[in-house]
Image: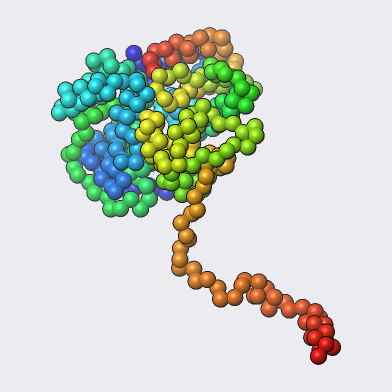
Amino acid sequence: MSAHAAAPVVSPMLLRLAEDRATGALIRDHGTLYLVDGRVVHAESPAAPGVDVLLTAGGRLPRAGWQEAVDRAGARREVGRFLVDSGRISGGELEICHLAALFDAAYFVLTPGGGPTRFRGGVGHWMGQVRPVPAADVQRETLRRRELLEAVWPYPAVDSAPVVPRTPSPGQTVTPRQRALLARADGRRTPARLARELGRPAFHTLLDIRRLAAAGLVATPYEPAAAPAQVPPTVPAWVADIAADPDTALLRRLRDALEAHL
Amino acid sequence: MANTETALKEATTIIDGAIGAALVDYTSGMALGTVGGGKDLDLNVAAAGNTDVVRAKVRTMEMLGLNEEIEDILITLGSQYHLIRLLRSRGSNGLFLYLALDKSRANLAMARHQLRKIEASLEI
């Protein structure tokens, strides 16, 4: 897209590493991106369910099958290939699931203010290469996701608070996916935990929660207080308006009325 | 057993009149893969926008109480067909195949049939 040059940069270091065709791990507070020849091959974040959760939670792959793949192919960093070659899942399915996990984790890794960025050259991931993604695509998608959340419901407090469902208005419906989410929302589980339990990407869950918040179907916590730098004014704001244009005629009548009663 | 790239390439080569195709995750609106398109049809934008079409239809069916699944959605323009085929994936994420066709060269019945075969080849 031609807008690339003007687009804000999510991580200058990521783009530099991509240009240098670097191989290794880019580590930030919210997770790690793994690169091979400057392309992103894997991403992990504690905020996002891993590809193992996405594959096993829905019963698609038995947990034991996943564990066996890690045990047998993890050391040579070919878990992805092993899963396909051993017939456990199809190439297309692994790719789709892995891409979902990769972009999901990358969104959280690249969270603004995610602490210092470090790079450890040469470090690989045991998953191996499934489908490498250009760093520019990861950046573009991360930005798009941020804007999407912002457009749906611009108050991030719902992202981390426990989800509390609210009674729908008459005639209000939710999608089957949202219904499954609400069914598990017990006022204690956070969106991240719901995502893990349902085996869904965390971003998808945030998006559903924000849509539900916008529809009034989940409670919205109070935003943390805005920057305390703002000193509260000593007199109400309307005082300034009055002083700018005093209604002298009214004041005079008031004075006259008061004097008449003295 | 195809990966997403070959499945999409197949869609644009064997289906007459295909202009572009995308495999889209309809919760997030992300295109997991695109083939064709070009500067007249930005498939990433089409992917994100058409998720709203699919979501609106899913919501409408909920409101109507129709307990059915959407097979495909056809949008007819002056010179193009846009075909959205929802995939019955075993995974938990909703996906659809998006196909833009040149109306003057396309055979709609054939395109739908071939799209169904491509879905099967993805084995998801």
Q: Give x and y (percent) for residue A257.
A: 83, 84
- A106 displayed left or right of A236: left
Q: Is residue A109 visible from the viewing direction of this image?
A: yes
- In this rendering, the answer to whether B78 lies above or below B118 is below
- Between residue A41 and residue A183, name the one nearer to us: A183
Quarter holding the N terminus of chain A is: top left
Q: Residue furthest right?
A: A260
- Which residue sits at x=40%, y=36%? A194
Q: How many marks?
A: 0
Residue A35 location (% of width, % of height): 26, 37
Quarter location, residue A71 = top left
**Horizontal and vertical percent position of residue A2:** 46, 40
Colour scheme employed for the rendering of this structure:
rainbow
Q: Which of B111 and A126 is in front in this view?
A: A126
Q: At 49% from the left edge and 68% from the top edge, which residue is drawn? A: A230
**What residue sits 55% from the left and 40% below the top?**
A166
Residue A125, above or below A230: above
**Residue B29 point in image, percent of width and height:** 48, 32
Q: Residue sitting at 45 percent across and 28 percent down?
A: B25
* The C terminus of chain A: image quadrant: bottom right
Q: Nearer the viewer, residue A104 or A221?
A: A221
In the rendered view, does A68 fall on the left or right side of A236?
Answer: left
Image quadrant in which you'd find residue B70: top right
Residue A206 in view (yes/no) = no
Find residue A191 and report its image quarter. Answer: top left
